[in-house]
Each structure stands twice: as structure tokens, then as C-alpha cells.
Amino acid sequence: MGKVLEKKRLNEFLSKVSKGGDLIAPVKRDTLRFEIVKDFNDICLEGRPLFPVKKFFSPAKEDLFNLNLTNKNKPFDEEKIKLKPRVIFGGRLCDFNGLLKLDKLFLSEEYQDDYYKLARENTLLLGINCDPAPSEYCFCESMDLEKYYDLFFHDMGDKYYIEAGSEKGKTLIIDLEDYDFTIPSIKCEKKLYTKDISKYYDDSAWDKENDKCLSCGKCTAHCTTCLCFDMIDELEADVKHGKRFKEWDSCQFLNFTEVAGGAIFRKDRINRFKHRIYHKLQYFREKFDMDMCTGCGRCIESCPRLIDFTEVINNFKD
Amino acid sequence: MLFNATPFRIVKKEKQTEDTYLFRLEKPKKEKIKLCYEPGEFFLVSVPGIGEAPFSVCACSKDFIEFNIRGLGDVTNHLIKLKPGDYLWLRGPYGTSYPMKELKGNSLVIIGGGTGVAPLRGVLKYVEERRADYDRVHAFFGFRDPNEILFKKDMKLWNRIFDLNLTVDKAPKSYKGRVGLVTKVVEESGLNNKNKIAMVCGPPIMIKFTIQTLEKMGFHHDQIFVSFERRMKCGVGMCGHCMISGKYVCKDGPVFRYNKVKGIRE
Amino acid sequence: MNKKLRIGVKSITGCAGCQLSLYFIEDVLLELLDKIDLVAAPMIKSKNEEEYDVLFIEGSVSSQDDLDNLLKFRKQAKFLIALGACASHGCMQSMKHLMNEKEVEKDVYNKFPSDKRLKPITSVPIHKHVKVDFYIPGCPPNNEEIAQVFKWLVQGKRLKVYDKAVCHECSLKENYCLLDQGIECLGPLMNGGCKALCPDYNHPCTGCRGMLDDANLKSGKEMLKDKGFDPDMMIKRMTKYNALQFKEFEKPPEESK
């Protein structure tokens, strides 16, 4: 049993739950993006942003240390992380499931990323159901997504049916009117028929798609769960002060595995091409018993050649 | 924070080859730090304004830790210019180690090539202090040429207490030692696999052929440990650079039992 | 250690815009003046010395004079940096590699038959004639990158050219992909490092920083065709800065004997 909210009261509701913090939602400018909302009327729930929400949990560029080479005893000064509480509204199940997967890497038992941890603790996840699927490239139906959210909205025409997925979520809607409804599950046109691809590594079907690959790294930039990064030191003009920062990187680039001395371990494009997909579907599962893919299809939709790995996998012959 | 480094003071710097130095670092007294690190583990050494690079523990006691550093990239070229009294910024230890306690009673076959000898020195130093705990130790070390030979001082001792086989790939005619590939020397030793554990570290091509040789000599894959080197940024299994076939060299490695990584693809 | 780095800038055939870009980082240069000596900077100094620790060369080799000068410069420089698209990839002068060179020469120089000083030779980037230690590509090269190179030189750090696709930096900014908007952007084939400056302003990338080392040209051409762009026009765009690279990519692989 959930609750119901009239659409005309949505802004009022959002302003209440995001009070004292930032509201993040899809905003339409030249294209749709998740942004910090300045005007509630900018929020657009038609379609889905092609860039995921990961940037709010580990930004494309994040300063780690202020460097001061003149201070021999303390050349590294830790960057203070300041984060306002945040509410993400209008994320889809794929967006939020992406976070569950990233938790495995950034909030492991031994090591936790400070920014990610703080962002996760301070963000409320208000999702919206995909009815119909927002893109022809979605295939999340095949990816066993969890119902992971604080609140989940379903569009019922003039009102939203809202379900809580956490205790925190429940308290947010406690005042709303009760409503009896079952949210329909997401239907995708695209399917991924098998996720066990271990025995197909050397299948020649990969080659055809690999021939199309430009190694431009757009698939990883748009992926809900790709957060590989580089760590870089950069100094100011005085060559004494500077920053050490993290910046997103991509396994699709030639230099990703380059070591001092110049050797490159994944030099051939095909190895890089397959590495991404095998990481998503096989390697991650071996470690954490879940796929690293949420079936959002952003990697396909954003690819300049519309390379579709699900097609390759679906067409493997035993 | 995750990437915070601790300063360790350099107390000794010993030239090994033209571009390689052995650094002994004193453990900071104030910091709460583990007393001794296991051989195989590594640290990320940081140079402010330049970056970080990983180094295997090359020897360790309760007061000091040693690294073998070869000037190859930006960080290392800077490090080898440092002098005793300067500080190195360390974070770690990271990664897996050779399970030395578990291996007690075994005979060890230690095979290293080039700078890959450094983490294995950690093993030999460990055994030196606990010689009675292990059976015979066969060490096979290969270097490019006589000028590249590392740890010459240690070799004298190892020659007495271990079965040391030193070889170089090529040498001038006047060189008296053994010339030839290390895999060849291993093969000619005629060792069998009985109660033995092999540990292999070196360039990828050397690892590949050494394993083939060990297989021929009857070693099972769970009797072999390999240690990999990959590009590494975070050291904690996040940045993705060092991953091979789903294994993070920084977290699941750098020391792997070979049956766990057999057939992995880049 | 305390010796200042002797730094020079020299030009051969080009528009001199690269040299100008170098002076645009005057704030950085001023900060670094206790560590570097700008011993040759023809655009801002009248007295210029020779012999350099680091020499920046702008322009491509397009005349016999250029070549003679370049060979001389190489001897005078310990470390030589190709500055800008002309010196790095040949830029527009190299477009004639895809045309009949004699006809081009006739078209241009017959207008001034009296000028006997001009001895054009096949226009090429400087690495075709001398060893180049580093490249700062771009037309014009990015100020920040030039500043970065200066800082690295002073730090004694190895110089590193940016070698990821333009799409990378463009995606980090969350730009609306121009290709998705029906605009013929060459970003996926070209070297970034420009912070995706052109696509950021909705202007398609034309590859002033050269093609990626592992550019997939074949697929790139198919992509542009699929999106309905005129193939001839696309090749002209691709070769605006990189005619030589394009030719090398197109060359059938040599048969192994």
C-alpha cells in the first residue's frame, strides 16, 4: 500500500523534502540532464537524461589534496569535502541500481571513498517508474534490477502513486493520502537473452562490432556504473603550489594500461572492447554476485556507431 | 582519507646499478603503524607535484622498511635523486603477500628477472631470519647484463645459505659468471616438484616462459605463485587501471597463486 | 640546478599564431622568469640569441629556406618541441598532398613569376626532417597546455601529450553530442586536450590536434556516411589539418615478405 499525490502539489512536495539542501532532477535545456534545480518549472520528466547521476557521487574531476611543496613537513593538505544534503528526483531504477553496484567498489569493507560515502549518506533517492520504457535501447527487464529507492513515483495522469522503499522514505510521505495500487513492471523491447558469456570470449561475432568501435570512450562516460579514474598532480605557475585530483578515465583508451617504461597491456582495440563488456557481465559477477550492468542502454544510445553488445550476445550460436 | 600518505625518513641509500637504488626508510615513531610488512605487499610512494608509484616491500624489520627503486618514470626519476634525511611519502601496505607462515616446512624455488627480484628479496630476507622454518631454498635470478645485477651484497650471503643461481642474458667475454636465460637455468637444475613452492616475478614474457618450464618440471599450478605489475593509481581496487580479467592487481594481487590466474586475459 | 633554462621560439612557414599563443601565457612566463630565460622570441624581442635548452618551432617545412633553418635549429637545440598544428601535423599547407603538387605550385606562384626567392618544396611537418622531442598540437595550441609544458620543463617532469579522443573531454562536460544533433563532428577520431573547445560552442571538431594514434578511420567514415554527411566533404574536413596522417592511415598495409 502506498500513497497518492496530486500533480499540482508536486512542486510543493519537492520543495518540502529538499528544504535546506539541493534538489537534483532532469532539466531540459538543449538536451536533458540531471542538474541542481533552480526553478521547479524546469523539471522535465519526459525522456531520460543520457548522462547518468554518477557525477553527484564522484564528480568528473575531484580535488583530493592541495599541494604545497614549500612545506616539507606537510606538502599534502587534504581538500575538505563540503556537501549539502541532496534529493535526486526523477532518477530511474537503472540510475539507482547503478549506485548499488558502485557501492561494492567505493564502499568496500576495507576501503571507502570519502566523497562517495558522504554523497551516498546525504542523498535521498526519489525515483520515477518507466512507463513506457524511455528509450528503445533499454533492456533493464533482463537485468534483475532491485526495487531500490527511498520513494518511487508512478504517473497516474493527474496524480502520482508513491511507494516508499526505506524508512526515511516512509516518513516523507506519512501525511499523504493512502492509496491501493500495484506499480506495473517495466517493459523493454530489447532483451538480453544470456548473461553467461564466459565461453564466448573468442567468438568471432565480437570482431564485427569491434571493427566499428572508435575507442572514443563515450560508452564509459555515459555508463551508470563506469567510474574508473586517473590521479593527477598539477602545479600552478609558481611550481610550488598545486592540486592532486581525480579525473574520470576510460578503459577504452589506448593508454589506460600503459606503465612507466611504455608497455601497454591492452594494446589491441578488441581487448579493450571486450574488457568493458566482460567486466560488466562476468568479472563483476564473479566477485560480487551481481552484474555491473543495469540495462539502461546508455552505452548503446550514446555510441556514435550505435554498437549494441546485446545483439552480439543474443546472436551467439552454441 | 583514503589517499593520505605518511612521511618515512630515508636513513640509507645504496646504489645498485646505474639507475637503481636501495632505500632504507625508518618507520615514523609517532604514527601507529604495523611493525612488519609481509613480503609481496606494496606501498604507493608519493612525490608531491609529480604523482605516485607502487613499490614492493623489499625487506622489512620492526624499525625499517626497504624499497628498490629504479628511475624509469617521473616519480622514480625524482625519488632516486633523494638523499638520506629526506622523506618519502607512503601509503599502504596494500595487496596480498606470499603466505610465508603457511609455507613453513616447504622447499622454496624462487625465480626472478630484473627488477622483479625486488619483492623476492623480501621473501629471502624473511627466510634469512627464520632459516630453520624452511627446507632448501633454490633461488634463480636473471638480469640483462652484469651491470644490471641487483643486491650484490646480499648475494654473497645467499650463496652460502641458499642454492643461488645467478645468470645474465648477455655479457662481455671477460665475464666469469653464468650467461643465459633464467628459464634455461631453471630447466637445467633438474628440480622436481616435491614439497616445493615456486615464486615467480619478472617481466610478463619471463613469467610466461618460466611457468611453462615449471609445468614441464612437474609443478602443479597451486604450487606456483606469480606476482604481477600493472599500471596502478588508487591501490585500493577503485580506479580500474590494474584490472586483468576481473582481478585487481592492487587488491586481489599483486601475489597470486597461479591456479587462480591461469588463462587470464589482458 | 640553479641554471636557468634557455628557451627559444623559432618560426618557419606558418601564420605565427602559435608563437603568439605562447606569449599569451605571459602571467605564467613572468612567474617563471627566475627559472627560465627566453633567449629567442622574435615577436617580442629584437636581440635574439642562439643555442637553446628547449626550442619551440612553429610552422611546417615548406621551402628550402625552411629546411635549412630547421636543420640549423635542431643542431642548436637540446630539446625540440613542435608547436602547433603546422609543425606537428602539417596543417593546411599539407592539404596539397592530396592534390597535384605541380598544378598547385603553378596556380600560386605563376601569379608572381618575378619572385625568384621562393623555392617551394613539398610541405611537411617538421618530424619528417628532424627528430622531434615533443609535440604541442592544435591550431592554435591551447594556452593552458603551453603553460603546462613550461611547468613540466621547470619541474623536470617528462612531457606528456594528451592522447584521448575529443569525445572524452566533451562527455565530461556533459555536452549534447553534435553528432546526435546532425552536425558533422569529427570528435571520435581526433586527439583531444583542447577541453573540447569547439564542440563546447556547438562548433564541430575538425581535428586541429591530429588524429588519434589508433583512430578507426574506416569506421569513422562509415559513421559519417550513415549520418548522411557528404563523404567528399567529410574527407576534406578530415584532411584540413591532417592530410599526411590521413594518407598514412589510408595506405594499404605493406605485405609481409
Image (spheres, rainbow, N blue to C red):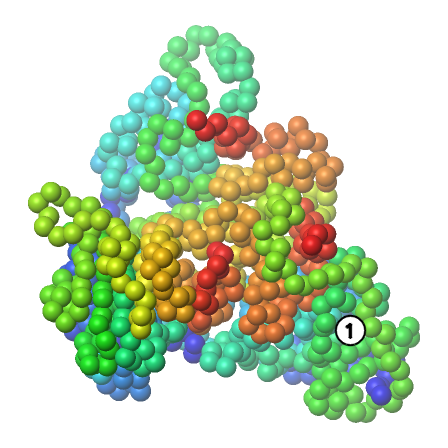
Q: Is residue A169 above or below residue C234?
A: below
- Residue at the disc numbered 1: A128
Give whichever of A280, C38 is nearer the camera: A280
Give whichever of C151, B240 is nearer the camera: B240
Numbered marks: total:
1
* Residue B167 falls left or right of residue B242: left
Image quarter of the N terminus of chain C: bottom left
Residue B220 occupies which quadrant of the picture? bottom left
Crowd rating for badge 1 (residues with CA inside 10 Å; few <14, some 14–19, many 20+): many
Q: Is residue C22 above or below residue A240?
A: above
> Residue A206, image x and y in percent?
63, 49
Q: Is residue C232 above or below residue B57?
A: above
SS for tag 1? Answer: strand
Q: Which residue occupies 59% across, 54% down?
A: A201
Q: Which residue occupies 36% across, 62% down?
A: B218
The disc labelled 1 sits on which kind of residue?
Answer: Ile
Do we see residue C32 in this rendering? no
Looking at the image, the residue that sits furthest to the top is C114
* Residue C244 falls left or right of residue B34: right
> Residue C58, image x and y in percent?
39, 34
Q: Is residue A273 above or below residue C247?
A: below
> Residue B127, image x and y in percent?
22, 76
Give whichever of B128, C104 is nearer the camera: B128
Residue A45 occupies which quadrant of the picture? bottom right
Do we see residue B22 in this rendering? yes
> Residue C60, image x and y in percent?
41, 29
* Residue C88 falls left or right of residue B75: right
Give whichever of C128, A6 is nearer the camera: C128
Q: Which residue occupies 18% across, 66% down?
A: B163
Please state the chain letter of the residue tagged with numbered disc 1 in the rendered image: A
Image quarter of the C terminus of chain C: top left
Q: Which residue occupies 70% across, 52% down?
A: A317
